[in-house]
């Protein structure tokens, strides 16, 4: 098997896990994941990402406080949300949502049930760990872009070690609360969180996989 085949298998196996077992991931395994993810490229080798990783009682304390905050506080992300999802981007977004709702038994149009499912973001989907991911404000969009590469590498390294993940932009909606909870300096942008642990194979939310566009849909070849 070539390196390409190995990487392609890891990419194919990775999914956004929405149901976790509570078994903790050993700290040395977490360190291996981060060590591998550290090897991604960044502009001028700035490596702008910083993580706060929780375990055990600290995860539960954050989970409960975050859910309470999200239940009563309007979104206030450090970075602006997308202005919209037009055309094919909206189609892909809706397809993912419908797959999730079908998997967990939510009927189309049941807004109350879909809202409850969305709020599971703030329970961290039951994960035993969460990583809060930040980048320096002074580096702006390029710091965020570099950190996005790190988030991808984190998820792939975790998958290679049998650890499931879900990157969560939803957590950034509660940036003021997260900043206060973890005493994160004002000069860092809260970009997302990554909830992680061992996947619950019996959880219905883990029973579907999203599609990917064909190469021809994303590449324009010039010669």
Image (cartoon, rainbow, N blue to C red):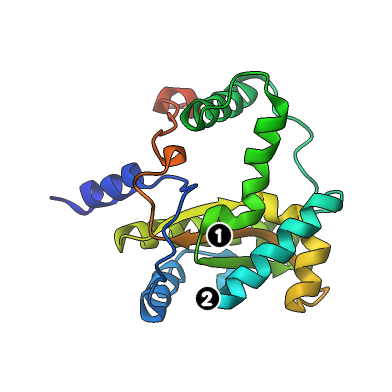
Image x and y of residue 45, in percent: 55, 72
Indicate the secondary structure of the residue bearing disc 1. Answer: strand
Q: Marks 2 and 1: which is nearer the front?
A: 2
Q: Is residue 49 visible?
A: no
- Quick check: 148 above or below 54? above
Q: Earlier in the sequence, mark 2 or mark 1?
A: 2
Q: Residue 115 versus residue 210: which sits nearer the camera?
A: 115
Q: Residue 219 versus residue 206: which sits nearer the camera?
A: 206
Residue that appears at 67% across and 69% down? 62
State which quarter of the image contains the C terminus. top left
Residue that appears at 79% across and 34% down? 83
- Quick check: 27 above or below 118? below
- Quick check: 128 above or below 27? above
Image x and y of residue 63, in percent: 65, 63
Image x and y of residue 221, in percent: 44, 27
The image quarter containing residue 212 is top left
- Quick check: 68 above or below 37? above
Marks 2 and 1 close (CB-CB < 8 Å)? no
Image x and y of residue 46, in percent: 60, 73
Check residue 194 in the rendering and tell me which mark sits there, or answer none: 1
The answer to whether 91 appears left or right of 14 in the picture is right
The answer to whether 42 appears left or right of 206 in the picture is right
> Residue under circle 2?
56
Residue that appears at 66% across and 32% down? 114
The alpha-carbon separation of the residues under discs 2 and 1 comes to 16 Å
């Amino acid at each position: 098997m070539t390196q390409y085949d190995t990487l392609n298998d890891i990419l194919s196996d990775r999914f956004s896990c929405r149901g976790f077992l509570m078994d903790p991931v050993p700290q040395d395994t977490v360190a291996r994941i981060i060590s591998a993810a550290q090897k991604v490229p960044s502009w001028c080798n700035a490596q702008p990402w910083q993580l706060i990783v929780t375990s055990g009682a600290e995860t539960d304390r954050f989970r409960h406080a975050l859910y309470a905050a999200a239940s009563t506080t309007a979104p206030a992300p450090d970075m602006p949300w997308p202005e919209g999802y037009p055309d094919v981007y909206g189609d892909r977004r809706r397809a993912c949502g419908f797959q999730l709702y079908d998997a967990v038994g939510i009927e189309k149009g049941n807004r109350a049930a879909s809202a409850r499912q969305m709020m599971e973001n703030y329970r961290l989907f039951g994960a035993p760990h969460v990583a809060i991911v930040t980048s320096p404000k002074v580096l702006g969009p390029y710091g965020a872009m570099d950190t996005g590469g790190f988030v991808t590498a984190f998820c792939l390294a975790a998958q290679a070690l049998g650890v499931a993940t879900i990157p969560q932009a939803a957590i950034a909606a509660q940036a003021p609360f997260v900043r206060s909870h973890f005493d994160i300096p004002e000069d860092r942008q809260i970009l997302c969180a990554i909830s992680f642990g061992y996947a619950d194979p019996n959880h219905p939310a883990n029973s579907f996989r999203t599609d990917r566009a064909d190469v021809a849909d994303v590449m324009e070849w010039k010669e």
